[in-house]
């Protein structure tokens, strides 16, 4: 088959996407398929039909790769692609809509307020006073923890808000939840083994990709009962958003065993350091077998 691999792009997650795409291409070729390199920075996506592709593997992290725009184009062209469709992709990239849907479905997520760049400083600080320090600031439509920061007081809060507004005009300020951090991958509706995230510093972009101080452990420290309960919560969260194919949800586990949902990632990283292939390996799937499984379930939506 001729498999188009969409990777790179112009989002703030370009470098991670390039690493994911390079590894995916190697796996596709090792499976005996022809991999067509497609970087939207250098090609016109409206010309995709002329590549005569059998399927598309979307490895564009953030931006139009996860916003539903690419999925919409592929639906129109009737080219099967891996992962969630238009609506689930668009909702999952928007942290506010994701939290609202989870909350409406009885799932637990941290209390939050929505801050807009056009608000006055007085209005912003008044809204934020509904929460207690520490808080976490997140641009509304970014992944890879880009622009995410923790604030312990008013001065820090204002500084990290200004930094977050460099990435988005709308920002979530969430109550900081004390707990152990985990992430759980979902493959074709089934939760894979949970991965534990350990970091001596706040788990932001720097901990993931800068100093890389964070470490990932699979199997995790959860008991079998705790793991099953967390996987059931993850599957419910995944289904509530209407996702398909694959995805990864980050969570926090409190001392009272409450699972707090953090965010949904519809195009997980597939680099050497990424947790999705780590979880798949723990479930007995090699990297190549994982790619093949995803390709086998590629589809497009008709309207």
Image (cartoon, helix red, strand yellow):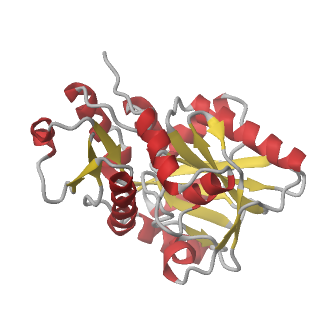
Q: Is residue 283 above or below residue 189?
A: below
Q: Position of residue 161 (x, y in %)?
A: 48, 67
Q: Give the image location of residue 266, x and y in percent.
A: 48, 45
Q: Residue furthest front?
A: 32
Residue 13 position within the rendered picture, expressed as x and y whole percent measured from the top left: 37, 63
The number of callouts visible is: 0
Query: Is 16 located above or below residue 224 in the figure?
Result: below
Q: Residue at x 62, y 81 (%)?
A: 213
Q: Is residue 126 visible to the viewer in this orientation of the structure?
A: no
Name the residue rendered at 84%, 56% in the picture: 222
Q: Position of residue 298 (x, y in %)?
A: 40, 33
Vertical relation: 267 (above or below) 215: above
**Quarter of the image where the N terminus is located:** top left
Q: Is residue 127 left or right of residue 143?
A: right
**Quarter of the rendering occupied by the C terminus:** top left
Q: Residue furthest bottom?
A: 211
Does any portion of residue 5 appear in the rendered image? yes
Q: Give 79 or 133, whichever is nearer the viewer.
A: 79
Looking at the picture, does residue 5 appear above or below residue 120?
A: above
As rendered, which of 6 and 55 lies closer to the eye?
A: 55
Q: In which quarter of the view is residue 228 placed? A: top right
Q: Farthest top residue?
A: 303
Is residue 182 left or right of 53 when viewed as pictured? right
Observer-nearest of 77 and 285: 285
Q: Residue at x 65, y 29 (%)?
A: 104
């Amino acid at each position: 088959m001729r498999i188009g691999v969409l990777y790179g792009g112009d989002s703030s997650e370009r470098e991670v996407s390039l690493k994911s795409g390079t590894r995916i291409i190697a796996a596709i070729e090792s499976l005996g398929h022809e991999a067509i390199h497609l970087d939207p920075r250098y090609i016109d996506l409206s010309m995709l039909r002329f590549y005569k592709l059998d399927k598309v593997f979307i490895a564009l992290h953030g931006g139009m790769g996860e916003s539903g725009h690419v999925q919409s184009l592929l639906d129109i062209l009737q080219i099967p692609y891996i992962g969630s469709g238009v609506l689930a992709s668009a909702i999952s990239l928007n942290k506010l809509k994701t939290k609202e849907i989870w909350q409406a479905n009885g799932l637990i997520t941290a209390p939050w307020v929505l801050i807009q760049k056009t608000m006055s400083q007085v209005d912003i600080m008044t809204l934020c006073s509904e929460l207690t320090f520490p808080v976490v600031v997140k641009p509304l439509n970014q992944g890879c923890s880009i622009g995410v920061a923790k604030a312990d007081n008013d001065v820090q809060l204002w500084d990290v808000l200004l930094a977050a507004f460099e990435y988005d005009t709308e920002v979530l300020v969430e109550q900081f939840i004390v707990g152990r951090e985990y992430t759980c991958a979902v493959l074709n509706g089934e939760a894979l083994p949970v991965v534990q995230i350990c970091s001596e510093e706040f788990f932001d972009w720097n901990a993931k990709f800068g100093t890389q101080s964070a470490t990932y452990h699979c199997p995790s420290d959860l008991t079998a009962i705790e793991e099953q309960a967390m996987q059931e919560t993850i599957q419910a969260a995944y289904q509530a958003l209407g996702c398909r194919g694959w995805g990864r949800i980050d969570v926090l586990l409190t001392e009272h065993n409450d699972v707090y949902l953090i965010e949904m990632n519809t195009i997980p990283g597939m680099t050497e350091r990424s947790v999705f292939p780590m979880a798949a390996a723990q479930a007995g799937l090699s990297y190549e077998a994982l790619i093949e499984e995803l390709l086998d379930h590629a589809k497009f939506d008709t309207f």
